[in-house]
Image: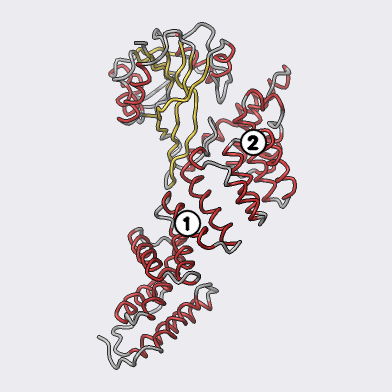
Amino acid sequence: MATLSLCMIVKNEARFLPGCLKSIRNVVDEIVIVDTGSTDETVKIAKQFGAKVHHFDWNNSFAEARNEAIRYATSDYILWMDADERLNKGDVRQLSFLKQRLPSEKDIAYAVEILNYRQGRWPESAFQTRIFPNLPGIEFRGDICEQISFSLAERGVKFEVSRVKIRHLGYLTSQIWQAKIQRNLPFLKKALKERVATGEFSWDIHYYLGMSYLNLNELWLAQEHLMQVLNEDCRFKNPFFYISAAVHLSDLLQKEGESHQALQILLKLKNEFPHNDFVLYHLGNLFFQQEDFQKAIETLSQCRPENIQLGIVPVSKRDYVFNYYETLGFCYEALNEIEEAIYMFKRALGVKSRALGLMAHLSSILLFKTNKTEEATSYLIKGIKLAEKEGIPTKGQEIYIALCLMLAVVLAKQCRIEECVFVAERLLKSINLPATKVIHKLDELIGIYQDIGENLKEKGFIWANLAFETAKGLKELPDYAEKK
């Protein structure tokens, strides 16, 4: 069986390093760590895990530091990681399986799925070449956003995608993420200047700059750099960067009102990559935004949602699959194909079962367009319970009120007075109206729903009419003298 070295570069990583090494140490044959100037316990921790520690004077080049690390590797293959990454038990098993079949010819490199965790968000995933044969001449290139793939391709090494996943914890908050972008910008600008001076290709640097400015919301600069990525050299050598740049550029143009230009970019992209699911998804989504619902359906129907990913470019696959079904649902609804819309919305909720906004929308269709009251009620109760469990955040308060109002309409029609009282109490609390101590008469309950309706109407709440409808439904019930 082939041997595997873990190679890392570190600096002041005492916080993350133990978790990383603990997760990986039993599946690698050696750990090589190059320290670039730590002043904390990093080196001590590395040695406790049996790592071979070497020192390197930091010179603002990530590639040179990584090359120093792989220079000391003695195994057949190399896995590179950062300290803020780790594997769970399932990932370790997958890596162990892969290790057992690493070819002795040392002619294949393997991409792994990197899961970037963000606070309050589902992880973004991307594929990156992390496992490669230990061969002469293999090196990282690029002072910043360093790449190993170019030298591997020059040696004729083939690439495969593995089932291994690495979990990245380094971008948990937006502050950390933006700080790292700001840190990288001077290096990227310097690298671009040097590439231009030597006449080398620079589309990769333009891509990283474009995405950096996009994340910093400097949209004009982002657009300027992304345009420089769309050339034949990039399309041939790195289609992932090419596709990603085109998609983001199209999105920027659409937001600026340049709809025709945005569409032309994606139509050209589809012509170049006719079977790419990521491309088909974005083109279909653009047709939807431009209200060409039939073309949106035709395009999205060619797409396989489970295959929506873009290699080394991070995307949240779960978000994409959810949006795919949700968008199709809205398209079918716009064309009044209600049963198809309901089916797609249910598929979307199968991906994100806690999507309260879509849950409320589906409930309204079931209740008011198809008269499927029982099914609607099930979704409404589930949504209300979920919102209350999560503390009804401010941004979701309107959705919560809508769910309560729709449920109130159902309860009133079904003569479920006590439950109407229960819902009224929650609505009063949500809109900061004083709660009535005890409701004795049906007229009092009717008055409360009328007050709720007036309050929401003044605030411009689009579902306010449901409060009045509830009041109307209660008026049509037998006259209850008292309610306890």
Of residue 170 and residue 234, the one placed in the foreground of this image is 234
Coordinates of residue 335 in the picture (x, y in percent):
61, 61
Residue 343: give its label.
1
Q: What element carries label 2?
A: loop
Q: Is mark 1 on a helix, strand or loop?
A: helix
The answer for how far apart the CA atoms under marks 2 and 1 are is 27 Å
Give the labeled residue for mark 2: 274
Coordinates of residue 69 in the picture (x, y in percent):
45, 14
Coordinates of residue 70 in the picture (x, y in percent):
45, 12
* Residue drawn at x 55%, y 21% as measured from the top left: 147
The image shows residue 20, relative to residue 274, as above or below, that is above
Say whether disc 2 or disc 1 marks the residue closer to the N-terminus: 2
The image shows residue 79, relative to residue 184, as above or below, that is above
Which amino acid lies under the numbered mark 2 shown in the image of this protein? Pro
Would you call the spot at circle 1 few (<14 residues within 10 Å), some (14-19), or many (20 or more)? Answer: some
CB contact under 8 Å: marks 2 and 1: no
* Residue that sits furthest to the top in the current view: 136
- Tell me if 238 is positioned left or right of 432 in this view: right
Q: Quadrant of residue 375?
A: bottom left
